[in-house]
Amino acid sequence: MVTVTVYDPPQCCATGVCGPSVDPKLAQFAGNLEWLKSQGITVQRYNLAQEPGLFVENSIVKSILDRSGEDELPVILVDEELVSCGRFPDRNELSKMTGLEMDSSIIKDAPSSGNCGCGTDNTDCS
């Protein structure tokens, strides 16, 4: 079974989808993670503000934090391999990262952008 682990930047709650002004990309990403779960993917999500120990226990995440602090969060691992950092991938990217086949008619979100530049080919992340 495929496992997606998300190491989020510090947020007020586990998903960042709370409070009076919700960032639309966080809401979209939370929905995309729920979609992954509905496809049989195991999803684990950690928040730096609430679970900092888990960030330093993972050597990949710790290395990224040591290199650039919080600037490259979120860090996303699939089966403990780095697939993305510094941005929230869209549903299409998540499906490719996890090996799911996507029907183009169900892609409902726009591509995300970020500062890291890494994606499914791991460029600039390791």
Image (tube, rainbow, N blue to C red):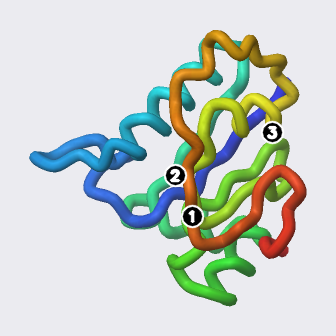
Q: Which residue is mark 3?
A: 97
Q: Amino acid at mark 3?
A: Met
- Residue drawn at 65 percent across, 10 percent down: 105
- Residue drawn at 66 percent across, 88 percent down: 66
Which mark's residue is nearer the viewer, 3 or 1?
A: 1
Q: Which label's residue is closer to the chain start, 3 or 1?
A: 3
Q: Which residue is mark 1?
A: 114
Q: How many neighbours does mark 2 have within 10 angstroms: few (below 14), some (14-19), or many (20 or more)?
A: many
The quarter of the rendered structure image containing the C terminus is: bottom right
- Percent position of residue 46, x then y: 52, 52
- Residue drawn at 72 percent across, 57 percent down: 84
- Percent position of residue 108, x then y: 53, 22
Q: Is residue 49 above or below residue 67?
A: above
**Mark 2–mark 1 distance (CA, rounded to whole Å):** 19 Å
Q: Which residue is mark 2?
A: 46
Q: Amino acid at mark 1?
A: Gly
Query: Element at badge 3?
Result: helix
Query: Element at badge 1?
Result: loop
Dividing the picture into quadrants, the one containing residue 91 is top right
- Percent position of residue 14, x then y: 38, 46
Which mark's residue is nearer the viewer, 2 or 3?
A: 3
